Amino acid sequence: MTNAHASSAFVYARYSTDQQNQTSIDDQTRVCKKKAALLGLNVIAVRADEAISGSLPVAARPGGKALLEDALAGKFSVLLLEGLDRLSRDLVEQETIVRRLEHRGIRIIGVSDGYDSETDGSSRQLMRGVRGLINETYITDLSSKTRRGMAGQIARGFHVAGPSYGYRSQVAATNGKGEPIGYKLEIVPEEAAIVRRIYDEFGKGLSCQKIAHGLNDDFIKGPRSGTWGVSVLYGSPRKGSGILNNEIYVGKVIWNRSHWVKDPDTHKRVRLDRPKSEWVIEEKPDLRIVSDEQWAKVRERIGGLENRGKGTGTKVTPRRKNTLLGGLIKCGKCGGAVIAVDAHSYGCANAKNHGPTVCAGVRAPRAELERKIIACLRDELVSHANVAEITSEAHDIVRKYIKDMESDRKRRARRLTTASRRASRSTARRPSRSRSVTTALRLFRYRGKPSSWRSTERRSWQLAMKPGT
Ligand SMILES: [Zn+2]
């Protein structure tokens, strides 16, 4: 299947951010080239991915994607790797890629793990499976090592996360060389006073909007030097985020609240909340900023708001996208998003959430603005040139659709003919079995055959090859 010369080889190298560095691409390439020289292979190109985790699918990496495209185009016959783990640290992904490449007649050689496509059948498969398993557990080990390390730091009394507003991180211990080995938190008095002000104002019944506007009006720097907004103050009571929900202000540090897992379908990392029973709560009275009374007052008011389901400009409810232009227009004064600020008007989101100090704001009646913009769009769309262009594009789409439908129909017809031919042959041999049962059995067997598996495989390979997937 490959049209490249039998000795033309590609090298693929990858390093991830953990422990390895830039030079490891050169190191990997060097060992691969040395092996190539021993085997009399001619390395014609090197594909590499820098600072990319082995858990990311090969087709989603720039170098990996190019490698797969070159493989499909038959540009090389041998792929040299430092080890199979360079390809992937995901057992399933590694197996899929190796099978696809070997199916195309490409020989894969892992220099350090000794993998070679030319080794005989079962022992090679066994070795590949075991290697894949070891490579995958490395990632699991790494994350539990990190978690163990963090637990150790916490047990030694160190703080392992970034400081919340009101605190700064200080070096708590150093090693023999004077390098920091642990950090602790320390109250920043000026910021602590602001935290108390927020708790007092909210306790008195002020909305988060009013509190944020007031802080911005007084030119007080917000967390991470930003301006004050509703979300910074209110956050999520359930997740304990936002200044009004963070228990650190009453001297309680909470660990192990959530963890990250990889979604096997999207390959994206998603944050999952842990049940309260798994939280680790540490009492740190020296970090307390607000009194129990201040805390209780805030809790009472937030509890009421959450139960009512909507706050009076206090609770942050993500605005439903049920307005025509919300989020599509920008504020002429600050460049922020324009949203429906109430039932009748559009206005600047920054002015609403952060106050007049951040943006003086813009405002327009919803009905009138929508009418005007739709009129502009209509004039724009129905111009002679635009109608011609839209019509031609629509024709293209319909033509392509018909073509796809036609080839799909032909393919199905072919499969049906083959299947019924087999079915009728079998009914002729076994007249006792009903025709429908035989057809079903035949179809089942047909689907299970390697030849049909390969064509399915080829289709998914082609899908993977499409740009942007
Ligand atoms: Zn604005």
Image (tube, helix red, strand yellow):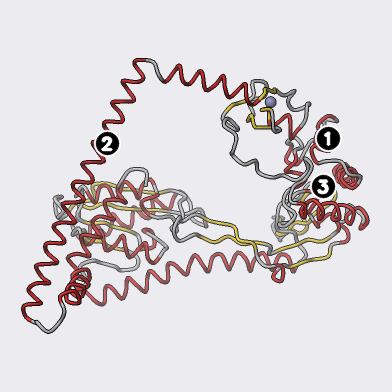
**What's the residue type where badge 3 is placed?**
Gly
| SS type, badge 3 | loop
Q: Work out whether mark 3 precedes mark 2 in sequence or the reverse, and give the earlier one.
A: 3
- Residues at discs 1 and 2 in contact (Cβ within 8 Å): no
- Residues at discs 1 and 3 in contact (Cβ within 8 Å): no
- Across and down, in percent, residue 87 comes to 36, 58
Tell me the tag on residue 398: 2
Residue tagged 1: 215
- Across and down, in percent, residue 227 comes to 75, 35
**Are there few (<14), some (14-19), or many (20+) residues within 10 Å of tag 2?**
few
- Above or below: residue 116 compared with residue 243: below
- Across and down, in percent, residue 295 comes to 88, 55
Tell me the tag on residue 166: 3
- Above or below: residue 31 compared with residue 275: above
The residue lying at 19 percent from left, 46 percent from top is: 406
The residue lying at 37 percent from left, 43 percent from top is: 468
Marks 1 and 3, Cα distance to the nearest angstrom?
Answer: 15 Å
**What's the residue type where badge 2 is placed?**
Val
